[in-house]
């Protein structure tokens, strides 16, 4: 503008611009428990200022997943002024899981038969169901495990199983329950015991026979669904029968690991049905007279069972012909069990020996003497016989003329005959 007021106008453009980013203050990095709030009111809020105006604060989250529902969040804070200038800074928010799952329902005990009969549950079902336990976790899934080791329980012994609920981050909580495998069923006798009979002294050593029979449980076998079987028996000794024989009725008992028992019974017999072993019979014998017969001699037999042996000697006499008597002499050997055997000897009584006697001496008598008067003529003497006692001599005369008138020569023949002729 000049002094006279004339003006000339020209424009100068002055641009006031804002190209300075605002300042930004963000919260510190922070770690929170899974399930806790990550709202800025909890984790912190950024602030900002600008040299030239107001500042708008905003954020975006970028998450990197860790175990379960835990994660690492990169929270990017942005300060923007009115001119669109921005400043960004990152806050790291770590969401961790250090909290164990919660056992909502504990595991429950179970008792079943060892063969799992009569039960709607089995050990497998119980384990697969975690003993009925229920667990929850605020930060992910729950995986169950247990410390079952396939052990077998006998007689309702309680076996403790720990069920463990583990979340995705390895935090765990446990619940404990017991199971008992119950056995109330006795073993099954698959083969009953069998009687055994041995012959005394023939079948070998008696003690060994008994022990072998007992050791084999009389041949009995048994099975059990739950445990091994232990055998026992009530044998004490054999009863005393004849001689060394005897018997015993033995009960064999199969007992399982829980004391359930079942039995089978059989009898062991040690018998003697064997006759004594006889000696050789004496040779047959021929005697002259019945008086020559002596009492039976003593013979000895042996026995398989070490029994006492009673020996009797009996004569069976056939005397229909008194001069040819046949005697059967039998020795009978009887052991204590009544087994018997016998040997026999034949004895013949036959008198073949003629009697003996002495005749009177030759004699000469007068014709007026009676030749039949034995008191004068003489009689036999010294009559003797090996068997007969009543002997009577007879005679017969052979009369011949003598050398003189009225004279004779008599040859008198005496005969003595015993009872057997």
Image (cartoon, grey):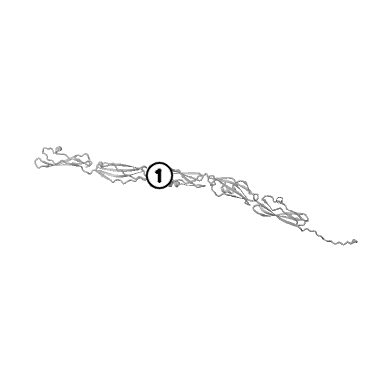
Name the residue furthest right: 4
Residue 295 image point, x, y percent: 28, 41
Q: Please give the residue where the numbered disc 1 appears in the rendered image.
A: 270
Apparent side of residue 265 relative to residue 322 in the rendered image (left or right): right
Apparent side of residue 37 relative to residue 16 in the rendered image (left or right): left
- Quadrant of the image containing the N terminus: bottom right
Q: Secondary structure at mark 1?
A: strand
- Quadrant of the image containing the C terminus: top left
- The crowding category of the residue bearing disc 1, from other C-alpha atoms within 10 Å (few below 14, some 14 to 19, many at least 20), is many
Residue 400 image point, x, y percent: 12, 42
Residue 383 appears in the picture as rendered: yes
Give the quadrant of residue 287. top left
- Relative depth, front residue between 212 and 410: 212
Residue 129 appears in the picture as rendered: no
Residue drawn at x 40%, y 44% is 270
- Relative depth, front residue between 304 and 8: 8
Count of numbered marks: 1
Residue 13 image point, x, y percent: 82, 60
Name the residue furthest left: 405
- Relative depth, front residue between 417 and 98: 98
Apparent side of residue 191 relative to residue 294 in the rendered image (left or right): right
Residue 393 image point, x, y percent: 18, 40
Apparent side of residue 179 relative to residue 18 in the rendered image (left or right): left
């Amino acid at each position: 503008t000049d002094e006279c007021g004339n003006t000339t106008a020209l424009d100068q453009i002055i641009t006031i611009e804002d190209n300075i980013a605002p300042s930004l203050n963000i919260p510190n990095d922070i770690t929170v428990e899974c399930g806790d709030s990550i709202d800025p009111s909890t984790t912190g809020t950024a602030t900002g200022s600008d040299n030239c105006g107001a500042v708008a604060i905003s954020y975006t989250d970028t998450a990197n997943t860790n175990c379960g529902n835990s994660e690492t969040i990169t929270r990017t804070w942005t300060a923007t002024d009115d001119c669109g200038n921005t400043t960004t800074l990152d806050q790291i928010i770590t969401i961790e899981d250090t909290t164990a799952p919660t056992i909502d329902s504990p595991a429950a005990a179970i008792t079943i038969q060892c063969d799992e009969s009569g039960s709607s549950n089995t050990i497998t079902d119980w384990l697969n169901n975690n003993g009925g336990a229920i667990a929850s976790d605020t930060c992910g899934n729950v995986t169950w495990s247990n410390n079952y080791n396939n052990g077998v329980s006998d007689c309702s012994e309680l076996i403790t199983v720990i069920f463990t609920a583990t979340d995705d981050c390895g935090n765990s909580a446990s619940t404990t329950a017991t199971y008992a495998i119950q056995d109330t069923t006795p073993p099954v006798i698959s083969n009953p015991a069998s009687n055994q009979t041995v012959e005394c002294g023939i079948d070998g050593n008696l003690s060994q026979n008994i022990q072998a029979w007992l050791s084999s449980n009389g041949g009995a076998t048994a099975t059990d669904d739950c445990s091994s079987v232990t055998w026992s028996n009530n044998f004490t000794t054999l009863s005393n029968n004849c001689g060394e024989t005897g018997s015993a009725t033995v009960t064999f008992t199969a007992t399982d690991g829980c004391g359930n028992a079942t039995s089978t019974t059989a009898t062991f017999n040690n018998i003697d049905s064997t006759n004594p072993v006889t000696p050789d019979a004496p040779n047959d014998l021929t005697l002259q007279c019945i008086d020559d017969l002596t009492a039976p001699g003593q013979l000895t037999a042996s026995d398989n069972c070490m029994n006492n042996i009673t020996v009797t000697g009996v004569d069976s006499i056939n005397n229909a012909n008194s001069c040819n008597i046949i005697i059967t002499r039998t020795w009978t050997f009887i052991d204590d069990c009544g087994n018997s055997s016998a040997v026999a000897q034949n004895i013949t009584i036959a008198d073949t020996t003629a009697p003996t006697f002495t005749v009177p001496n030759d004699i000469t008598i007068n014709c007026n003497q009676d030749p039949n008067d034995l008191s004068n003529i003489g009689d036999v003497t010294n009559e003797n016989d090996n068997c007969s006692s009543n002997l009577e001599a007879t005679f017969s005369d052979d009369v011949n003329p003598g050398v003189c008138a009225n004279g004779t020569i008599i040859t008198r023949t005496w005969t003595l005959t015993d009872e057997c002729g």
